[in-house]
Image (cartoon, rainbow, N blue to C red):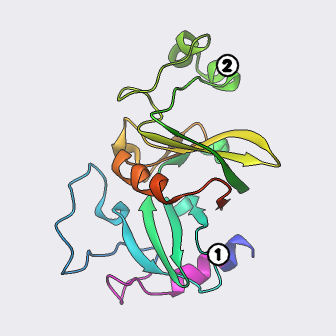
Amino acid sequence: MNRRAFVTTLAALPVLAAPSVGLTQAAKAPATAPEAPKWPIAPQFYPTEVRVRKDLAVGSLIIVSDKFFLYHIVAPGRAMRYGVAVGKGELKFRGQAVVGRKVEWPSWKPTPEMVQRSPEHYARYAENGMPGGPKNPLGARAMYLYQNGHDTAIRIHGTTEPSSIGHAVSNGCLRMVNDHVIALYDQIELGTPVTVY
């Protein structure tokens, strides 16, 4: 399916939490839901259950980059939608991949391309990287995207900058609030298909 058809289909379906609102618009939390934590992100990027096409593969992940949403298909016709930050400009990742590796509190090392683009930010980490922990830019969890058995260097990961959610700011990776990436990580298996539009 091409991106336009997918986005059109998503936009035409109602949100479970607020039936009059399209999937690509902000949704109000259900009246019966407990009060959501106040993350430093816009409310439309809070986890929200939404309706999607029933033929989307259960368990798969779909990211619509220009809307800053990640959809985890949890049942036929149902998905949990999360806000994400995506790659800036020409660094946006597009295509299909699978989750080839999962790591709790991952270590991080910038790619040679990142060091070349911005040595003032990354050169000091080029040799040894940074161990996992609360100050690590990959946050609490990382899911490593692979294509044809090879690491793409793209991750779905947490962040030390939750206010970046809803913006195109990364070096290509897909950032999530740490609470959200932990919840997603716990449900995702190795081999999970991922499509990024």
Left/right placement of residue 10 relative to residue 162 reads right
Q: Is residue 175 above or below residue 42?
A: above
Q: Position of residue 89 (x, y in %)?
A: 61, 44
Indicate yes or no whether the magenta region holds residue 117.
no
The C terminus - image quarter: bottom right
Q: Position of residue 72 (x, y in %)?
A: 52, 67
Left/right placement of residue 144 relative to residue 27 reads right
As rendered, which of 137 and 120 lies closer to the eye? 137
Q: Quadrant of residue 43?
A: bottom left
* Outermost residue to the bottom: 20
The N terminus - image quarter: bottom right
Q: Is residue 119 above or below residue 75?
A: above
Residue at screen point 43% across, 50% down? 181
**Mark 2: amino acid:** Gln
**Mark 1: amino acid:** Ala
Q: Quadrant of residue 81?
A: bottom left
Q: Position of residue 179 (x, y in %)?
A: 34, 50
Helix, strand or loop at disc 1? Answer: loop
Q: Label for residue 151? A: none
Find disc 2 in the rendering and name its residue: 116
Q: Is residue 82 visible?
A: yes
Q: Is residue 121 above or below residue 165?
A: above
Of circles 2 and 1, the one toward us is 1
Find disc 1 in the rendering and name its residue: 57
Highlighted magenta segment, given as a residue range? 6-22
Mark 2 or 1, nearer chain start: 1
Residue at screen point 54% across, 26% down? 108
As rendered, which of 192 and 40 lies closer to the eye? 192
Q: Residues within 10 Å of mark 2 (few under 14, many from 20)?
A: few
Q: Residues within 10 Å of mark 1 (few under 14, many from 20)?
A: some
Q: Position of residue 169 (x, y in %)?
A: 50, 41
Q: CA distance from mark 2 to mark 1?
A: 39 Å
